[in-house]
Image: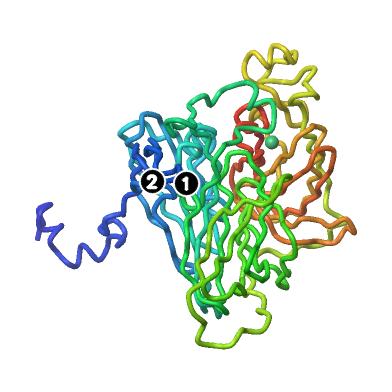
Amino acid sequence: MKLTRRQILTTGAALALLPRRAFAAMPELVAAESRQQIAPGGYPETAIWSYGGGTPGTEIRVPQGGRVSRRLVNRLPQPTAVHWHGIRIDNTMDGVPGLTQEAVPQGGSFDYDFELPDAGTYWYHSHNRSMEQVARGLYGPLIVDEPKAPDIDRDIVLMLDDWRLDPETAALDGNFDNGHDLSHAGRFGNLLTVNGRFDPAFEVKNGERLRLRLVNAANARVLEVGLDGLEGWIVALDGMPLESPLVVSGAFPLAPAQRADLFVDVTAESGAAASLLSIERDGGYGLCRFDVTGQAAQARRTAPEALPPNPLPEIGDLAAAPLHEMRLQGGAMRWLDSAMLGDTEMGGRELAQLGKFWALNGRADRPEAPFLDAARGSLHRIAFVNETNFDHGMHLHGHHFRLIGANGTPGPWRDTVLVPPGETRQIALVADNPGKWLLHCHMLGHAMSGMTSWFRVA
Ligand SMILES: [Cu+2]
């Protein structure tokens, strides 16, 4: 019997031969212009760009080992792409225009479909003109649940951002390419928000244990995070559980793109408010409030156990691993004398005229040849040597790495490491995920103005 096309499509036997995913409509993630009340009440709304109608974008939450399937639909006035930050992902899904895919044009779409090997707190954000697109609001939370839910009362995602708004109109400052920001610390704002709002409040009870999932979505600001009326532990960094929870005492740094999962107990009394604070030189500012009403049903818990480890590779013999130095160069007060841009050696002044103020090992922007060509499964040490006068948060795509402590032993797993001015940070990387991976500073203005490189795993 010869089937017509129509008969094939309506025949169950034929359908069974086709992958199911071809039929399940892929949920859309629409990137578009929208408006939101970012500034305090009384100010006008701010025109933003967002995923799914607001910033942060739609929360994507999946069980560990599950998949994310989203059709990015671009209704922005610019090409775009989505990077799934911190996911040890298939290279073709990493969302880096010019390296892993073409930017999605206006009106176009791209299907992202990938597996989530690790539980934890991740995020997604634009990786095209990210300096501008992330600042306009193009980011959202990506949460991967542990198979067994930890013993907590509430799970609260807190995406921290730093907006530069006009103090009269609350309009976003649209001067993204200005040389002063690019050559200094980056684009700092004048309004800190949590989940796209100024000083939001959450209702809690005295004695409750909260899981706070902090994500620093700011372009450039390193936050020093503190607690008031809350006591607890850091249980994970950049998504990955710590071997033993770390008591929070005083402030801890959270660089752009970094995450910290906290388990905190509400110690503020009923009727009072607890706070998450940003600690600055002249004091502490409230990022968000926890209004305490009533008492938890159960007595205060004992110290938490570590979260179950993710299936990360074993770090082998560190001493035998080749050491690669990456010197971070340039910026204000340490201006580049010269650097390679593509095949051309250029003077610092010429580079500055092209908006390039930074270099990695003497190269501005992503060079033709990778910084590191790694055999799949091989172990490497990378030393980030910060020769500049500014902080840089160095991020590797497709992999987590272990920070090597001052005593030479492997520390926490991270995907973004903060390297303070004049200091060196060494990491251990098992290059086990094949593909072409970006390696760049996550101060997004720095990345755009020279601090971008890449490595290859084959
Ligand atoms: Cu930087």
Identify the residue at horizontal 55%, vertical 50% (top origin): 160
Residue type at mark 2 is: Tyr
Identify the residue at horizontal 55%, vertical 72% (top origin): 210
Can you tell which quarter of the image residue 31 is in?
A: top left
In this view, the residue in front, 155 or 330, is 155
Indicate the position of residue 269 as horizontal and vertical percent values: 58, 75
* 2 and 1 marks in contact (CB < 8 Å): yes
The answer to whether residue 367 is above or below residue 29 is above
Residue 18 visible in rendering: yes
Tag 2 secondary structure: strand
Give the numbered dot on residue 445. none
Name the N-terminal-most of marks 2 and 1. Answer: 2
Image quadrant occupied by the N terminus: bottom left
In this view, the residue in front, 145 or 71, is 145
Indicate the position of residue 357 as horizontal and vertical percent values: 69, 23
Give the alpha-carbon distance from disc 2 to disc 1, as whole Å: 7 Å
Indicate the position of residue 151 as horizontal and vertical percent values: 55, 80
| Residue to which mark 2 is pinned | 51
| Residue to which mark 1 is pinned | 139
Identity of the residue furthest to the front in this view: 271
The answer to whether residue 442 is above or below residue 407 is above
Number of marks in picture: 2
Q: Is residue 246 left or right of residue 77?
A: right
In this view, the residue in front, 292 or 353, is 292
Identify the residue at horizontal 56%, vertical 23% (top origin): 177
